[in-house]
Image: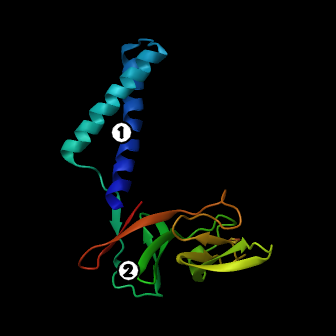
Amino acid sequence: MLLRSAIHYELVVNLFYAVILSEAKNLLVNVRLTKRQSVSRGFSCFLLFTIHSLFIGVTVPAYVVPEAKGLQPGQKVIATVQGREIGVFNVAGRLHAVRNVCADQSGPLCQGDVFDRIDAEITEDRRIREVLNAGRPVIACPWHAWEYDLQTGECLWNPKYRVRVYAVEVAADGTVTVTM
Ligand code: FES
């Protein structure tokens, strides 16, 4: 998971560099390229950067969260990582990390309660039945109770709102890292 995120990050960064480099070259030599030439030049730069990354290794934007080491099921910690406040939660032995800013009015989301998600479904006799969705923890903001899926960061009442969630890794010695 961590490696996959790192590779996605690397590809996006490479793409960014490629566009910048190809544009800079155009400006330096003061040549107006056709759209097709620009795209092809950008793609060549992207390939070059990607091959370079493969040789020097991918950049892993992962940061250690010392406060989260030894976190037990049911416990949480709020820490500052790279200037951002995040909460790390141990829910039934699995760690989740989420930004401590609610998408509603920037409330301190990580001070809210975590519980299992409850879904509703319509039965054949057209009744509404609630189903406990264990394994999909939800966090509720303490200010106005907006609820978010801790795995995806999606707001339950309207998926167009979301909060940042981060991939978490636990090393053999218990060190916790998050990918940002
Ligand atoms: S600030 Fe979080 S629900 Fe309003």
Q: Residue 90, how many percent across, how many down?
A: 44, 81
Q: Given the image, on which type of amino acid does mark 1 rest? A: Asn
Q: Residue 26, how many percent across, how many down?
A: 40, 18
The front one of 78 and 138 is 138
Q: Is residue 136 left or right of residue 23?
A: right
For label 2, the SS is helix
Residue at mark 2: C-beta within 8 A of ligand 1: no
Residue name at image x 51 percent, y 68 percent? 151
**On the image, which quarter does residue 126 sit in?**
bottom right
Sequence order check, earlier mark of 2 and 1? 1
Question: What's the CA distance linking mark 2 and mark 1?
Answer: 33 Å
Q: Quadrant of the C terminus?
A: bottom left
Number of residues whose C-alpha sits closer than 10 Å to that of mark 2, classed few (under 14), some (14–19) or many (20 or more): some
The front one of 107 and 122 is 122
The front one of 105 and 121 is 121
Q: Residue 36, how many percent across, how many down?
A: 45, 16
For label 1, the SS is helix
Q: Which residue is mark 2?
A: 67
Q: Which mark is residue 162?
A: none
Q: Given the image, on which type of amino acid does mark 2 rest? A: Glu
**On the image, which quarter does residue 4 sit in?**
bottom left
Instruction: Find ligand 1 in the image and state its quadrant.
Output: bottom right
Number of residues whose C-alpha sits closer than 10 Å to that of mark 1, classed few (under 14), some (14–19) or many (20 or more): many
**Above/below status of 143 relative to 29:** below
Q: Residue 102, how many percent across, how many down?
A: 63, 68
Q: Which residue is mark 1?
A: 14
**Above/below status of 168 relative to 58:** below
Residue name at image x 29 percent, y 51 percent? 59
Q: Are marks 2 and 1 in contact (CB under 8 Å)?
A: no
Q: Is residue 13 left or right of residue 122?
A: left
Colour convention? rainbow
